[in-house]
Image (cartoon, rainbow, N blue to C red):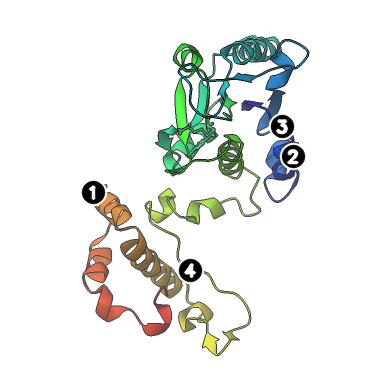
């Protein structure tokens, strides 16, 4: 899979490509990444990439022309490297888009990749958006100063889903929103020491009894999801993912939860 990123700040990406567990995905080429400096496609001595908005008002708008030139160069580069290359979608990071979620990340992680555009200033000339952008993706209902953080978030989430990137193959399956958890939130985790600040680890985790531990973790997922994301419980129920045992536990959740296993 190959992602091409159009950005005015390619240097922002380096730390995320060279640190942590995801490094493997980029080093092995499981996720191929090519950064394109938009300014290289701008004309004139100043290599201008933005101008004032028609109609007045604050801020600057990204010029359509350098964006188009950069896009053409990317398409050319991709088809030179891979003759049977299908046109991958052009993604613009923008508050307009659907917020990124697990289902979206899963789809991108199994795709051929995409061309990602990181906006700056007030955003892109709308005519370019109409002409070329296939999908808009948001990171949430707030405004960033640029699309780079959104691009890095997408690439990071996609990279950790690649086979061989996490040490334990199945470990992402047990993460929040994943199928093995029926889309619920992950349970809380504990490590040494057994007693910290006079609080002990839930005893079941020290029991070595796998079935009991599994049951406890499932219940904790249900508790946390019910408390923080009841919409996930509703979705799991609608998808037929909640067993009669789960439903019984949920119905009795306030009486059955022990103080030490409460989420907060
Ligand atoms: N005027 C725009 C905000 C521009 S912010 C508006 O009010 O909608 C500059 C750039 O940051 C945007 O072009 C976009 O690429 C990026 N950006 C800002 N907020 C974002 C978000 N929530 N998700 C993804 N990208 C975002």
Report whether the residue tagged 1 is closer than 8 Å to ligand 1: no
Callout 4: SS: loop
Lower position in the chain sequence, tag 2 or tag 4: 2
User: Alpha-carbon distance for marks 1 and 2?
Assistant: 42 Å
Lower position in the chain sequence, tag 1 or tag 4: 4
Whether residue 241 is visible = no
Disc number placed over residue 10 in the picture, else none: 3
User: Alpha-carbon distance for marks 1 and 4?
Assistant: 25 Å
User: If the image is split into quadrants, where does the C terminus sit?
Assistant: bottom left
Disc number placed over residue 14 in the picture, else none: 2
- Left or right, 133 with reference to 225: right
Who is closer to the viewer here, 131 or 162? 131
- Residue at the (49%, 16%) spot, across then down: 54
Nearer the viewer's eye, disc 2 or disc 4?
A: 2
Callout 3: SS: helix
Q: Do the CB atoms of the residues marked 4 and 3 lie less than 8 Å apart? A: no
Disc number placed over residue 111 in the picture, else none: none
User: Alpha-carbon distance for marks 3 and 2?
Assistant: 8 Å
Who is closer to the viewer here, 121 or 101? 121
Q: Looking at the image, is 29 positioned above or below residue 48?
A: below
Residue 214, x across and y down, in percent: 43, 68
User: Alpha-carbon distance for marks 2 and 4?
Assistant: 32 Å
Residue 154, x across and y down, in percent: 55, 38
- Left or right, 56 with reference to 68: left
Who is closer to the viewer here, 198 or 205? 198
State the residue position of label 1: 238
State the residue position of label 4: 188
* Crowding at mark 3 (Cα within 10 Å: few <14, some 14-19, many 20+): some
């Amino acid at each position: 899979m190959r992602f091409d990123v159009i950005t005015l700040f390619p240097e922002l990406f380096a730390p995320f490509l060279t640190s942590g567990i995801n490094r493997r995905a980029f080093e092995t080429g499981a996720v191929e990444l090519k950064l394109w400096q938009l300014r290289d496609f701008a004309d004139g001595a100043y290599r201008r990439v933005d101008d004032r908005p028609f109609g007045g008002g604050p801020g600057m708008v990204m010029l359509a022309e350098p964006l188009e030139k950069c896009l053409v160069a990317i398409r050319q580069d991709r088809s030179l490297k891979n003759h049977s290359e299908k046109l991958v979608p052009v993604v613009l990071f923008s508050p307009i888009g659907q917020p990124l979620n697990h289902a979206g990340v899963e789809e991108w992680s199994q795709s051929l990749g995409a061309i990602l555009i990181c906006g700056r200033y007030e955003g892109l000339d709308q005519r370019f958006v109409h002409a070329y952008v296939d999908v808009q993706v948001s990171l949430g209902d707030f405004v960033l100063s640029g699309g780079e953080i959104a691009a890095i978030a997408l690439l990071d989430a996609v990279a950790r889903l690649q086979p061989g990137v996490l040490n334990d193959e199945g470990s992402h399956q047990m993460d929040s929103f994943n199928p093995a958890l029926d889309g619920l939130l992950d349970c809380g985790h504990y490590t040494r020491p057994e007693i910290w600040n006079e609080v002990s680890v839930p005893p079941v985790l020290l029991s070595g009894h796998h079935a009991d531990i599994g049951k406890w973790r499932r219940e904790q997922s249900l508790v946390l999801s019910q408390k923080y994301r009841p919409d996930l419980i509703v979705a799991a129920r609608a998808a037929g993912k909640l067993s009669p045992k789960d439903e019984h536990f949920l119905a009795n959740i306030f009486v059955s939860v022990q103080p030490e296993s409460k989420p907060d």
